[in-house]
Image (spheres, coloured by chain):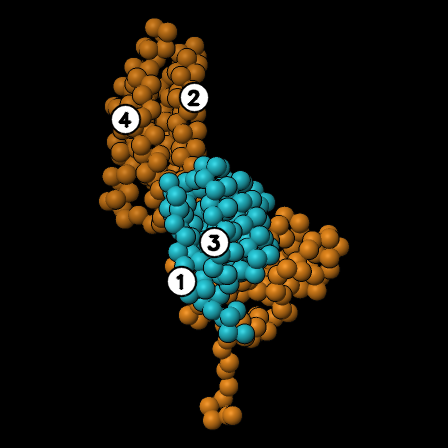
Amino acid sequence: MKIPILKMEDILIVTIQSELTDREIEELSHDILDMINKVGAEGLIIDITALKVVDSFMARSLNAIANAATLLGSETVVVGIQPAVALTLVELGLRISWGVKTALNLEKGLEILRKKKDK
Amino acid sequence: MAGEKRVAEELVTLFEESEKELMDLWVRKVNQLRVMKGLSPEERDREFKNIYRASLKAFRDGDYSEVERYANKIAKRGALEGISVDEILLSFLKLRDVRMRKIFIRYQGDLPRLLDALDYFEKVSNRMFSIVVSAIIREREEIIQEQQCAMLELSTPVLQLWDEALVLPLIGVIDSERAARIVEELLGKIVETGASVVVMDMTGVPVIDTAVANHILKTVQAAKLLGAETIITGISPANAQTIVTLGIDLSMIHTRRTLREGIKLMYEMLGLEFKKRGEQ
């Protein structure tokens, strides 16, 4: 199943609706970077509200996508991390807070990107 | 075994026959001790009679369930009405004394039978006594556990200070169980209120060691994943020194000396400013 990448003005929004296989994650990061390149997006929001589990590969991939997107000039915000997921990530010692910004929900994610743009 | 059964029957008959006499004696002795003042006379008589009958059952066929039931009931009431352990135990021991005397009087001319009777009597009495003591201890332990739970709950309030701001005043020693609870509660509250700033005040935390610091770091990171920045306030000079000596890196966390300073920073982060009315 191909995950849709929505474009809203100069922001890309990706909503992950179900658990992804490693292969699907690889594909998705490829698609996202291509899309950023094509439309010249200034911001990227990845919404993982629906994910109950985030494994180490997923966390690492989110990091990789964010870092690559930053190189392409697009700031990344991961939104909708569930409390249980946050706890697991911290317990595992996985940080997705360095290259990536995080926000509670899509609304707040958009707010962060807007603020950045206004400056 | 058959001998024991015979002794048991004899004792039960003896106690049944002299129930009135022994009860009166027992109640009088307990009155002399000035214990069980909390109960009205009728209530006490009824209770004592029930206990007396329950213990007879134990003597008759070694069935301690009644005794156990009464012991639990009394332990519960003792805890509720503030009857001291002393009072309860002394009253029970008095019943034993009264009966023991009766046995001595009954078998005074017959040493072998007296010894047989005492053997059985002591066995059952001791068992009953231990049942009562365990019931009391169990009851107290339950109370202690309940209070611990209540304390745990009381000690980790998460307060909403502004639309998107939470305050978490930490008081007391933080162990891993409490830390886990704090994180859980905080994350839940962040989701509930959509908070973007959390002020964590450590004024009431006596000691910060590596474990505590680690818990705090984890809390901060988890909050950050939900999009909330954390400001830590109220680290005492001694604690600050410990943290530095231990080589714990708190540089990625906003820290302020007092809760007041922390709240000022919080307003700043929320993009608010507060000033006197009419001031430019």
* Mark 3 → mark 1, Cα distance in angstroms: 13 Å
Q: Quadrant of residue B94?
A: top left
Q: Can you give x and y, in whole percent of width and height, for residue B240 in the image?
A: 70, 61
Which chain's residue wears label 2?
Answer: B
Q: Decide: is A94 above or below B63.
A: below
The residue that appears at 33% across and 15% down in the rendered structure is B8
* Mark 4 → mark 2, Cα distance in angstroms: 19 Å
Q: Are marks 4 and 2 on the same chain?
A: yes
Closer to us: B40 or B154: B154
On residue A35, the disc is 3
Marks 3 and 1, the one that precedes in the sequence: 1
* Mark 1 → mark 4, Cα distance in angstroms: 96 Å
Decide if residue B6 is on the left or right side of residue A94. Answer: left
For label 4, count other residues whose C-alpha is less than 10 Å away and answer few (under 14), some (14-19) or many (20+).
few
Confirm or deny contact between disc 1 and disc 2 (CB under 8 A).
no
Decide if residue A19 is on the left or right side of residue B169. Answer: left
What kind of element bears circle 3? helix
Which chain's residue wears label 4?
Answer: B
Instruction: Give the farthest residue toward the top.
Output: B2
Rendered colour, chain B: orange
